[in-house]
Amino acid sequence: MKKIISLFVVAVLICTAMVGCSKSESVATDGSTSMSKVIESLSEAFAEDTGIEVTYNATGSGAGIEAVLAGRCDIGLSSRDLKDEEKSKGLEGTILAYDGIAIIVHPDNPVANLDVETIAKIYTGEIKNWKEVGGNDAEIVLIGREAGSGTRDGFESITDTEDACKYRQELTSTGDVITAVSQNPGAIGYASVASVKDTVKALTVGGVAPSNETILDGTYVIQRPFVLVTKADAELSAAAKAFFDYALSEDAHELIIAAGVVPASD
């Protein structure tokens, strides 16, 4: 069903059309692979109502932030907060939504719950066999994301495992992590809750399952923000500003929730 953009955003589009905003314009976004579902959903609805195409380059949070700095995109996408050094370069982050980071295992793995301390011990190599946490007698295979990933940054910050994880594989996208875990009965990984499929099993963490409700109330502790990154001292194009405002408006909430994440303004 066609989504209706707020009167405010429509007014922006009408006004800016007089100074060159046309249906041939596009908006370039670049960054977090975890944000693919929500950005693609918002982009499709926005294009349907305005005729303005929003492109999405899934490069990872770090690369998306660099793309904004280099002027290669209008809006960067980061699944972590901006670091102080990034802010000092003139970047500004606006939180779009909150997403849980699911701890995932193969569906046949009998382990159903781990606490944050145990997850940290697994990823730093202190716990090496699933039988140590109530599972099968099998080596634990550690799957994670590449350096620069917002998901990795969020996971390691929350579990206090920065620069200490003993990864077997460091993969470049959320989808690759899910695929790797789904194909290895001994694997454990982490991925955006919004992207988790039934090919893997999401564990409860400290007895709490990841959901919109537990992310919003904070009881699911492994979570992070989805951030729109822009240059603080530079104006967005008319088309990019219209998309930015739409993404943050109440009209976008239904789409954001349907994508499995929690709108920041809720």
Image (cartoon, rainbow, N blue to C red):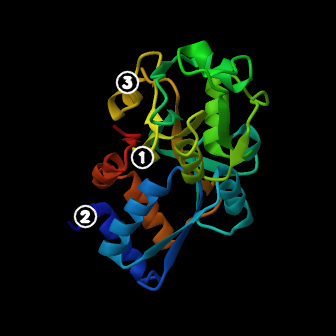
In-front residue for pair 3/71? 3
| Secondary element at tag 3 | helix
Write down the quadrant of residue 128 in the picture.
top right
Q: Position of residue 143 (x, y in %)?
A: 65, 39
| Secondary element at tag 1 | loop
In-front residue for pair 132/23? 132
Q: Earlier in the sequence, mark 2 or mark 3?
A: 2
Tell me the residue that label 2 is attached to: 3
Q: Position of residue 114 (x, y in %)?
A: 52, 18
Asked whether the beta carbons under mark 2 and mark 3 sit within 8 Å of each other, the answer is: no
Q: Position of residue 255 (x, y in %)?
A: 32, 54
Tell me the residue that label 3 is attached to: 217
Type of residue at label 3? Asp
Tell me the residue that label 1 is attached to: 197
Give the crowd class for mark 2: few <14, some 14-19, many >=20 residues within 10 Å.
some
Measure the C-alpha gap from mark 2 to mark 1.
26 Å
Quadrant (top left, top right, bottom left, bottom right) of the N terminus: bottom left
Measure the C-alpha gap from mark 2 to mark 3.
28 Å
As drawn, the residue found furthest toward the left would be 1
Residue 111, above or below 181: above
Measure the C-alpha gap from mark 1 to mark 3.
23 Å
Q: Earlier in the sequence, mark 1 or mark 3?
A: 1
Type of residue at label 2? Lys
Residue 22, above or below 137: below
Type of residue at label 1? Lys
Quadrant (top left, top right, bottom left, bottom right) of the C terminus: top left
Apparent side of residue 34 relative to residue 199 in the rendered image (left or right): right
